[in-house]
Image (cartoon, rainbow, N blue to C red):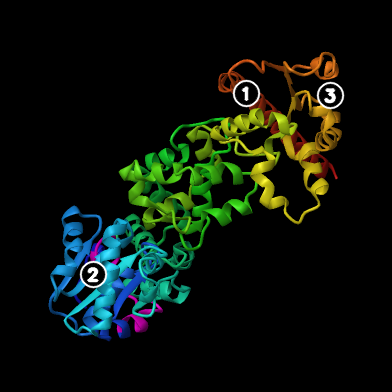
């Protein structure tokens, strides 16, 4: 057996030759490539083996002449892609990173695919490679395209395929990797991650070429993992920090970008539907929904080339996708409490579902809405009835609202105007939170147009005096910083109380 070099066996860039493994969709891909006029969309996470599979399938299909590979990451290639409809016949054209094209270019490609299919063209074939939902983004430009193209999703490869890859590499280098099972598990279906971990295992064992005698590695997986994370940190640490902080660090907020990064790190397929994930995490639902609805998430990613290289946000499908297999491995292996502290957040533990709940009469909704918008801009969770009307549909409203004002909100802001004592719902809400005055968890805002003496009891505690004759937004700007500081203080106190309770429980358990 000829001697091979490590970098040619466990490959970190380019198409592997000695460790190529056919993914489970390979046969379907091969047939689609052989079908005249039928364009192919191969979609899925980076590092899953799409490009390698397509290159090998093109060779196996006997399509060896006039094959052009383009990338939407390269400006000169993008110009060429735009002009493809005017260059027929084009042979076989691979378009990688398709999701990075603008809508105009995508529509041109969709129209060309339809033309090729209708003509059963033998002279031209398009093969598009993109991340999850690439096929759906094409079909949006023409519903009749769905039956004219082959969309092949590449999911995580099964464990036996990863084992096959490692086995081929071991045979090529005449070695036995002692942590093969751990590498297979850590790869989570990614050929690239398996290649990377096997490569660094060999590096640490000084295996650079095919061994003359069978050699067994002796590294622990933990040492390899720590080494790889350390290497990757040089490329990705600052990028992860920049994304987690968002457009502006709000230390007391609910860290929506940090949580998005954490959620996607836990995903098996390297992507999350942001809307569904926010619904699964009600403590961050408001802050996450806001950065999506106001395009802050999209703008953050598009504002940084470093972030664009590792993350993509599909606004149409509300999907956040990791584009780089090295980045997903890096964030999967972060110490998240330590990372959050480095990012600069006060706390990632949220003892309450909401930071604030607003209680007010309808005549004072202008103040409530202005406070809600300003507090949400600070990435805090605020209960405001209009923002949750869809969740209250078909619910018993008293059962829904009662817990929010009694305990689910860390603080209640009650806007005490002239109509507050007269309304049924404000009476119901105040009955739920009145016992919380003593614990300092109710912040009264006493309006200047309220009848004299009506809110004497509220005025005895620390409150905010609000002048109805003064500019609304100016007063909001004065008030919100104090509300934020109060929220941070209450959260820190409750987290401290929770930690003491856990310590006491542990102490009692030890004594028993």
- Mark 1 nearby-residue class (10 Å; few <14, some 14–19, many ≥20): few
Q: Is residue 82 magenta?
A: no
Residue 352 as seen in the image, left or right of residue 143: right
State the SS at label 1: helix
Can you identify the residue that label 1 sits on? Answer: 485
Whether residue 259 is visible, yes or no, is: yes
The vertical placement of 501 against 263, above or below, is above
Residue 24 as seen in the image, left or right of residue 121: right
Residue range in magenta is: 8-30
In percent of width and height, residue 9 lies at 27, 68
Measuring 60% from the left and 39% from the top, which residue is drawn there?
A: 348
Can you identify the residue that label 3 sits on? Answer: 438
State the SS at label 2: strand
Measuring 36% from the left and 83% from the top, which residue is drawn there?
A: 28
In percent of width and height, residue 4 lies at 21, 69
Q: Quadrant of residue 326?
A: bottom left
| Residue nearest the observer in this picture, 201 or 71 | 71
For the residues bearing labels 3 and 2, Cβ distance under 8 angstroms: no
Q: Main secondary structure of the magenta part?
A: loop
In percent of width and height, residue 245 lies at 46, 36
For the residues bearing labels 2 and 1, Cβ distance under 8 angstroms: no
Measuring 30% from the left and 69% from the top, which residue is drawn there?
A: 110
Task: Tell me how far mark 3 sits from mark 2, CA to CA.
Answer: 68 Å
Q: Is residue 19 magenta?
A: yes
Task: Tell me how far mark 2 sits from mark 1, CA to CA.
Answer: 55 Å
In percent of width and height, residue 351 lies at 70, 39
Q: Earlier in the sequence, mark 1 or mark 3?
A: 3
Task: Tell me how far mark 1 sits from mark 3, CA to CA.
Answer: 19 Å
The vertical placement of 179 against 463, above or below, is below
Can you identify the residue that label 2 sits on? Answer: 94
- Mark 3 nearby-residue class (10 Å; few <14, some 14–19, many ≥20): few
| Residue nearest the observer in this picture, 453 or 492 | 453
């Amino acid at each position: 057996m000829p001697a091979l070099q490590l970098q040619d066996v466990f490959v970190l860039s380019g198409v592997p030759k000695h460790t190529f493994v056919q993914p489970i969709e390979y046969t379907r891909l091969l047939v689609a490539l052989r079908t005249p006029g039928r364009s192919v969309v191969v979609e899925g996470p980076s590092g899953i083996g799409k490009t390698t599979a397509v290159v090998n399938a093109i060779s196996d299909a006997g399509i060896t002449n006039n094959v052009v590979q383009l990338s939407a990451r390269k400006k000169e290639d993008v110009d060429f892609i735009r002009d493809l409809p005017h260059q027929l016949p084009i042979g076989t054209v691979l378009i990688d990173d398709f999701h990075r094209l603008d809508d105009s270019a995508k529509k041109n490609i969709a129209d060309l695919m339809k033309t090729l299919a209708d003509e059963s063209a033998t002279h031209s074939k398009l093969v598009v490679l993109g991340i999850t939902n690439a096929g759906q983004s094409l079909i949006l430009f023409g519903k009749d395209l769905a039956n004219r193209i082959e969309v092949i999703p590449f999911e995580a490869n099964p464990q036996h395929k990863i084992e096959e890859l490692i086995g081929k590499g071991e045979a090529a280098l005449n070695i036995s990797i002692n942590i093969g099972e751990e590498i297979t598990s850590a790869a989570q279906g990614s050929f690239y991650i398996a290649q990377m971990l096997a490569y660094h295992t060999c590096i640490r064992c000084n295996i650079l070429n095919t061994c003359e005698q069978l050699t067994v590695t002796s590294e622990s997986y933990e040492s390899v993992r720590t080494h790889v994370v350390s290497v990757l940190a040089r490329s990705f640490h600052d990028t992860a920090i920049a994304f987690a902080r968002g457009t502006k660090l709000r230390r007391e907020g609910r860290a929506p970008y940090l949580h998005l990064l954490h959620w996607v790190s836990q995903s098996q397929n390297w992507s999350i539907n942001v809307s569904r994930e926010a619904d699964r995490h009600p403590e961050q639902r408001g802050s996450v929904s806001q950065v999506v609805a106001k395009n802050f998430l999209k703008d953050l990613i598009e504002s940084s080339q470093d972030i664009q290289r590792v993350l993509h946000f599909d606004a149409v499908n509300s999907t956040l996708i990791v584009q780089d297999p090295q980045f997903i491995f890096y964030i999967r292996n972060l110490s998240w409490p330590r990372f959050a502290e480095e990012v600069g957040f006060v706390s990632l533990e949220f003892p309450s579902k909401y930071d604030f709940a607003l209680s007010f009469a309808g005549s004072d909704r202008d103040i409530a809405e202005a406070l809600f918008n300003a507090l949400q801009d600070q990435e805090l969770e605020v209960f405001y009835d209009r923002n949750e009307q869809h969740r209250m549909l078909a619910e018993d409203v008293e059962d829904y609202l009662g817990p929010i004002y009694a305990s689910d909100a860390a603080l209640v802001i009650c806007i005490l105007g002239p109509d507050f004592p007269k309304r049924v719902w404000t009476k119901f809400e105040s009955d739920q939170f009145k016992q919380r005055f003593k614990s300092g968890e109710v912040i009264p805002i006493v309006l200047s147009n309220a009848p004299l003496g009506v809110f004497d009891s509220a005025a005895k505690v620390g409150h905010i005096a609000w002048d109805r004759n003064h500019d609304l937004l100016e007063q909001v700007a004065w008030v919100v910083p104090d509300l934020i500081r109060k929220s941070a203080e209450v959260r820190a106190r409750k987290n401290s109380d929770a930690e003491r309770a856990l310590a006491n429980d542990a102490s009692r358990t030890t004594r028993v």
